[in-house]
Image (tube, helix red, strand yellow):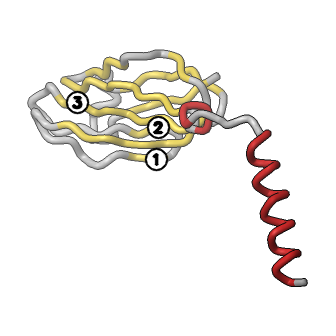
Amino acid sequence: MRTRWFALALVTVLAALGSAPVASSKAMAPNATTITVTMKEFKFTLSKRTVAHGLVTFKLVNKGALAHDFKIAGKKSKMIGSGKSGLFRVTLSRGSKIYICTVPGHAQAGMKGSLKVT
């Protein structure tokens, strides 16, 4: 009796799977956006000014002579040395997000801006 019940359950599950639509891996992947942030004295240049809410990967590229970091939505990257790069991931909610370099004097000198999150 137990074997019959298992076989019936297995056939039911396989039949259900056979008729269910199959989602592609692209459809199942979360919406993730990458923004390249070029850092130099004393400004940031972002490859996008508007981004969809959710997980955002910032590719930080320091083309300046000094070390810089990137702070947005209360999260701060590690310090990126001259000629170096790094990745920084943050989940962003909708709204306008201010970003800055936290090295003393850098934001005041122009290393700041605003990213629109839709």
Q: Give the SS element for disc 2.
A: strand
- Which residue in the protein does label 3 denote? 61
Do residues under tags 1 and 2 come within 8 Å of each other at their CB atoms? Answer: yes
Q: Amino acid at mark 1?
A: Lys
Labelled disc at residue 75: 1
Picture coordinates of residue 64 (x, y %)? 14, 27
- Residue drawn at the location 10% of the way across and 33% of the way down: 83
- Which residue in the protein does label 2 denote? 72
Picture coordinates of residue 104 (x, y %)? 27, 41
The residues bearing labels 2 and 3 have C-alpha atoms spaced at a distance of 16 Å
In depth, the one of 13 and 8 nearer the eye is: 8
In the depicted structure, whether residue 22 falls above or below residue 113: below
Does 60 sit left or right of 31 as displayed? left
Q: Amino acid at mark 3?
A: Val
Picture coordinates of residue 15 (x, y %)? 80, 49
Do residues under tags 3 and 1 come within 8 Å of each other at their CB atoms? Answer: no
Does 115 sit left or right of 96 as displayed? left
Residue located farthest toward the bottom when viewing the structure as drawn? 1
Q: Residues within 10 Å of mark 2 (few under 14, many from 20)?
A: some
In depth, the one of 111 and 80 nearer the eye is: 80
